Amino acid sequence: MQSYSAISLLRHALGGHRRWPPAWRSPVPKRHYDVVIVGAGGHGLATAYYLANRYGIRDVAVLEKGWLGGGNSGRNTQVCRSNYFYPESAAFYEHSLQLFESLSADLNFNIMFSPRGNLELSHGLEELEINRRWANAMTLNGIDSELLDREDIRRMVPILDLDCRFPIVGGFVQHRAGIARHDAVAWAYARAASASGVDIVQGCEVTGFESDDGRIRAVHTNQGSIGGDRFALCVAGNSSALAAQAGLQLPIESIALQAMVTEPIKPVLHTVIGSAVIHCYVSQSDRGEIVIGGGADPFHSYAQRGVLPTTRDNAAAVRELIPSFGRLRVMRQWAGVCDIAPDSSPVVGRTAIENLYVSTGWGTGGFKAIPAGGDTLAWTIAHAEPHPLLRPFSLDRFETGQLVDEGAAAGVAH
Ligand SMILES: Cc1cc2nc3c(=O)[nH]c(=O)nc-3n(C[C@H](O)[C@H](O)[C@H](O)COP(=O)(O)OP(=O)(O)OC[C@H]3O[C@@H](n4cnc5c(N)ncnc54)[C@H](O)[C@@H]3O)c2cc1C
């Protein structure tokens, strides 16, 4: 793997940047692999990387119907945080945030991780009480959080309208949270996985499964049949439809979530802001664009575009919080199809089909989970038992009733 460094940048600059090797190989798929992963989003790629680099399983293929990182992993609003309420979620997402903190160095790829803080606003005394409970739970879980009063928030984000329609009375911040460049995370894992021998096959759609004796033997694709010993579905908004083809029913709903960016402006917003009441979140990218997210579309859909009323509501919500942003022009709007479980928590690990694993239910918050999701699923595949951090997120919780109801922290208001 070509090392990315100041020296290599200088050397290639002298050559007019014409000799950079491709970041990953484009192999013709073999007919059989030890592990076949479907979906080259962040989760599929990270799982492949950790399988090859931490757990010694290098005979791995990642099959992607489009281009790698073209799903939700390249469509999200980049927020990374571990401010969850329940200990199970806190432990998992904190593992992920810690992996994010050293990911650029570990993968020799600048993922532009920027721990600029994540501020959750309280728009009334009742919400302040709920947020105080949330922040205290984080402290008990060993995760940094700081309660803020109105004056603290005014100092931190002077452009906020504290006297908006639902006046802001306080909030809490996780200072170690922040953003990372979303597609760089997918590219970084792809490059390192490919260098370790993982075959990443783009333009390869899985269209069916061949099974026998309670096991999956092969997947049917537009590039022929590909056999494997173990299979993992990491296909986000396509999870329930694809799993059904393997004979597995998943409690997952698919809903479009959209985002938009404005024209770039000088730095004015130095933290990520979330408001559950007005229901939007906003940050400023390193390029200066204001990145806006909000509620999901109000119906099920597989369309990666979203509907106009939601776009309008999201823009109106941000304008309510920061009126000056009402003068900015929106440059782009897009959507991804999210995979949402009834308790808004992920569903990861083994299934009733012996050699089939799933990584789904990441919903509107699975970007921040990519490093931990990949690491723990790879461990689970390698050891054929659930990683300790994944036990609470297994599929059988919908039979036992041991749900991890993280609706609020997951940012899912439905
Ligand atoms: C607008 C928006 C904003 C978001 N904001 C945030 C945020 O700020 N922070 C956060 O943590 N999370 C956020 N998320 C959620 C996050 O993006 C996802 O949870 C995460 O990217 C899921 O990653 P993945 O690898 O599971 O799925 P994806 O990145 O979607 O990858 C799945 C891949 O599977 C492929 N695939 C599907 N079917 C097949 C098939 N049959 N054969 C082969 N390949 C197939 C797809 O083409 C796709 O590339 C947001 C999502 C959206 C849509």
Image (tube, rainbow, N blue to C red):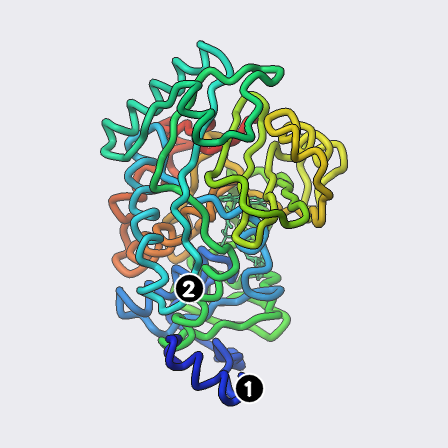
Residue shown at the point (45%, 68%) measured from the top left: 190
Going from the N terminus, do you reach mark 1 or mark 2 first? 1
Residue at mark 1: C-beta within 8 A of ligand 1: no
Residue at mark 2: C-beta within 8 A of ligand 1: no
Determine whether 374 is above or below 188 in the image: above
Determine whether 51 is above or below 94 in the image: below
Tell me the residue that label 1 is attached to.
16
Tell me the residue that label 2 is attached to.
110
Q: Nearer the viewer, residue 246 or 66?
A: 66
Q: Residue furthest right?
A: 308
Q: Give the x, y percent position of residue 307.
A: 74, 38
**Label 1: few (<14), some or many (≥20) within 10 Å?**
few
Q: Quadrant of residue 306?
A: top right
Q: Give the x, y percent position of residue 354.
A: 37, 54
Q: Nearer the viewer, residue 242 or 106?
A: 106
Q: Give the x, y percent position of residue 288.
A: 58, 50
Q: Is residue 210 left or right of residue 403?
A: right
Q: Nearer the viewer, residue 113 or 413?
A: 113
Q: Nearer the viewer, residue 284 or 43?
A: 284
Q: Is residue 4 left or right of residue 137?
A: right
Q: What residue type is disc 2 on?
A: Asn
**Label 2: few (<14), some or many (≥20) within 10 Å?**
some
Residue 281, can we see it? yes
Give the number of the disc on residue 414. none
Residue 299, can we see it? no
Residue shown at the point (25%, 28%) measured from the top left: 139
Q: What residue type is disc 1 on?
A: Gly
